[in-house]
Each structure stands twice: as C-alpha cells, then as structure tokens.
Amino acid sequence: MKPFSNLFTAALCLCMGAVFAQEPVTIGQTWAMDDVASGLDSTAQSFTLNETATLSSLRAAVVARYDTADHPGMLTIIEGFDPHGPNILLQQPVMVPGLNKFYGNLNGLLVNEVEQRWIDLQGTIADSTNDFSDIATEFPVSITLPAGMYTFIVSLDTGVTLNDFGYNYISAFTNCHMWYCSPQVFDPYEAAGQHFIGLNLANHPFERDMAFQVEYFPELSTSVEEPTPELLVNGIVAEAWDGAQLRLFDEIGRLTLSKQLDAGERLEIPTGQVYIARLSRNDQPLAVKKILVSL
C-alpha cells in the first residue's frame, strides 16, 4: 500500500478548486418557536438563489422525533419550488439527530414522556436558553447551481428504527404563526419558499418556514481563477497553508478532523473515503470542495 500522505496529496490537488475571493453568503430564516411533526419520514423547504453560486453548507433544524440516536437519512436537493420536481440535483446520505442531541438516554420512556421532552425543549427556545445555532444540524454540501428556485428534502431511512415505538417520524422547527404564539410570526423567509410536510409532502401553509440556512459562495466575477496551492508536498503541509484552519467532513456530514495547520507537519486521515474539505484563515473562507482520498 502506498503511504497515505502521498495519496491524500494527489487526491486533494486534483479535486480542490479555485480559492474563493469573497466571504460566503447566508440565506434562510432562523425563527424556531414551533416544532412541526411531519407525521411521516420526510420534511422539506424551498428557497431561492438570486445568483449562480456554489453551495457549501445547509443547516436545518430537523430532528428524528422519537429516536434515541442519530438516524441515517438522505439529503436531496431538487430543482423547483416544491419537492415534486423531476430534476434531482443532489442526493447524499446524512445523519439526522434524535432527541439525544438535547437529552441523555431516553430508552424506556413512554410516548407521552417523549412528547413532554419536546415541550420542555420548546420552552428552552421560548426563554432563549437555546436558539437556532443550538438546534440546527449542519450538512456540508458542494454543488454549483444557477440562479433559481430549489427545494431541499431531509428524509429518514425507514428501514432503520431507533426507538421503542416503531416510529420513523421527522420534525422540523419553524416560525410560530398560530393564534397562541408569542411572538406570532408569519412567513419569515422573505424570498420565495415555504415548508412542506405530510403525506407526499403535500401540506405547505404559506405562513410557515423551516428554520434553515443555506451558505454559498457567489460565482466569481472574473474569468481568471487563482490556482489553489498544494496542501501537502511529499506528505507534509506546505508553507502556503501554515496557520490555515482545516475542517474535514465525511459524506454524511460528520466532522472527522478540525485543526489549525502547521507548515511541515504530516496529516493522518483515513483513506478510501470521500470528504468535504473546508479551509479558512482568520475566519475568512479560502476553499470548499469535495475530495476523494483513494486507497
């Protein structure tokens, strides 16, 4: 077997794109005062891109409602305003957190006791103990899309059950627009888009949006791309990346490595996997790209 470091160098240098010349743009809305149970295994939200962009991250306040562990699932992005369009642009496996994200071991609880945990969790949002950053899950992505309308879907793998009740239900946090809400917020995502739940994702009140954020890099205005320096030279971090922050995610969004790079050090990363690498310096993003580390 070849040394890991040489293989990683080749994979990264072939797959990394141009250095981004600007900060990422974030769209979405973060009101999360209500939790909406889909009643089924999928939930969705549509959104609008006003320019050609490379998506680097999707953060969504979604939870496997009765699960006591992270649930395998799928993230899908579809062209169009609703989740029924024929053009699937991206599908990648993800892990959807259960209530274990907020509580300890929930094994042995009755359904009504689990529901009480949801009420308690909603109370922590109402009193600002928790906010969007606490309840959302980040799904790293890497896809370039033209300006237009799109819908993302988060679905649970129904072949896996991780609770005592046999349920595979997903919930999403949204704005609260009902009469009992305080504050009562209507349609907080200002661009075209809305939340979808229920059978065939057919339920979509126009007043409601999922709490979500899409992070993207606008298309560079210049046609001249600045080449990305090699990260590793003979398995050693190159001088050009000294002090840069590397965050490496696997295909299902788990952070596998987060560290500040030092010129001259050797990286130890498992091979035979696809990763999404995010490089930044002083909180300024430099590059985001899907990479393959071959055996």
Image (cartoon, rainbow, N blue to C red):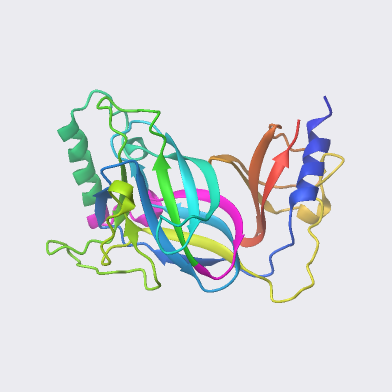
Q: Is residue 143 magenta?
A: yes
Q: Is residue 146 magenta?
A: yes
Using the rendered view, name the quadrant where residue 65 is placed.
top left
Q: Residue furthest front?
A: 86
**Residue 162 percent across, percent down from the top left:** 35, 28
- Where 4 falls versus 124 (above or below)? above
Q: Is residue 220 left or right of residue 66?
A: right
Residue sitting at 26 percent across and 67 percent down?
A: 207
**Name of the residue lying farthest toward the right:** 234
**Residue at horizontal 36 percent and vertical 58 percent from the top:** 211
* Quadrant that contains the C terminus: top right
Q: Quadrant of residue 155?
A: top left
> Looking at the image, which is closer to me, 203 or 58?
203
In the image, 116 versus 150, the foreground residue is 150
Residue at 49%, 41% in the rendered image:
94
Q: Horizontal and vertical percent for residue 219?
A: 65, 70
The percent coordinates of residue 48 (x first, y second) are 46, 68
The answer to whether residue 265 of the structure is visible from this angle is no
Q: Is residue 28 found left or right of 209 in the rendered image?
A: right
With 158 as the anchor, is 243 left or right in this view?
Answer: right
Is 200 located above or below residue 3 in the figure?
below
Residue 250 location in percent, x, y?
59, 40
Q: Is residue 238 visible?
A: yes
Residue segment shown in magenta: 124-148
Name the quadrant of the N terminus: top right
Count of picture labels: 0
In this view, the residue farthest toward the left is 180
Give the image quarter of residue 147.
bottom right
Give left or right: position of 143 versus 3: left
Near-viewer residue (83 or 163): 83
